[in-house]
Image (cartoon, grey):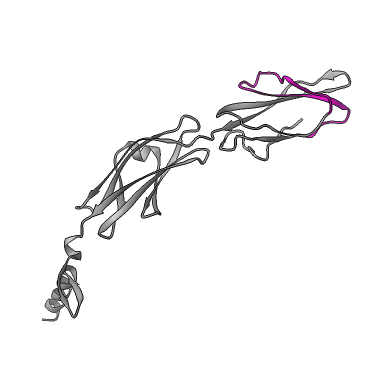
Amino acid sequence: LMISSPTHPDQALWYSNPDPTFTWTLPNGVTSLELGIGASESDEPTVSYAKPFEEKTVEDIEDGIWYFLMRYRSGGEWSTVQNYAFQVDSTIPSFDSLEVRYDDIRSVALVDVVASDEGSGIARYDLSLDDKVVMTATPDDVANGSVAVPVRTPGEHRITVSAIDAAGNVAEASELISAAPTLGSQIVFRIAGLGITLSAVLIVMGLLWLLT
């Protein structure tokens, strides 16, 4: 007898769905079933069904590692207990701390974040600049120090950190930063309403020097 699950197909992975479905194919001659959910693969099913069937959905399973258990009765005897492991984590991660500061020398936002997840654990962090994901960091990356997010334009920007656990649950937190204009981007004078930056002036001066 082979038990499978269309909702939790890989027994080694975590899923956010707390309502797993299980299917199986019974041999001929089965007269009744016993099913159950246990915290150990050595547990036994406890719910009896007088008529056989081949699919069962169990709702509102708590977070954790569980086993779907079943055995069938045929020819007056019970089969051995079959089990199928499944893992549920339907709870989003939580942020323990988040600090974002702007480094005007490197033109980056420095992100220090600590998040936790009691179920499947934090799988990765997505870092967004103004609602666009610009980089991904691993838990090791954030544990080793600040993560640098490049900020190319001056002004106010929103840095969003998405903590994603192994089951795909997402928690988000955001901070606003103010990026000062770099020296080269500052307007030094205007011609007919057009702002001329220091970088543009230096480029023109360099070209004139080459031509002389």
Q: Nearer the viewer, residue 173 or 65?
A: 173
Q: Is residue 80 left or right of residue 194?
A: right
**Residue at (40%, 41%) from the top-left corner?**
138
Q: Nearer the viewer, residue 159 or 198?
A: 159
Vertical arrangement, residue 30 with respect to residue 200, above or below: above
Q: How many marks?
A: 0
Question: Residue 10 placed where, x, y %?
Answer: 62, 37
Question: Residue 126 placed where, x, y %?
Answer: 41, 47
Magenta stretch: residue 142 in it?
no
Q: Is residue 152 left or right of residue 122?
A: left
Could you tell me which quadrant the C terminus lies in? Answer: bottom left
Question: Residue 173 placed where, x, y %?
Answer: 38, 43
- Say which quarter of the image contains residue 40: top right
**Residue at (82%, 29%) from the top-left corner?**
52
Question: Residue 4 placed where, x, y %?
Answer: 70, 35
**Residue at (18%, 73%) from the top-left corner?**
196
- Look at the image and give the residue range highlighted in magenta: 25-51
- Say which quarter of the image contains residue 189: bottom left
Q: Is residue 17 left or right of residue 179?
A: right
Magenta stretch: residue 44 in it?
yes
Could you tell me which quadrant the N terminus lies in? Answer: top right
Vertical arrangement, residue 108 with respect to residue 28, above or below: below
**Residue at (83%, 24%) from the top-left corner?**
50
Vertical arrangement, residue 106 with respect to residue 192, above or below: above
- Say which quarter of the image contains residue 26: top right
Q: Nearer the viewer, residue 55 or 199?
A: 55
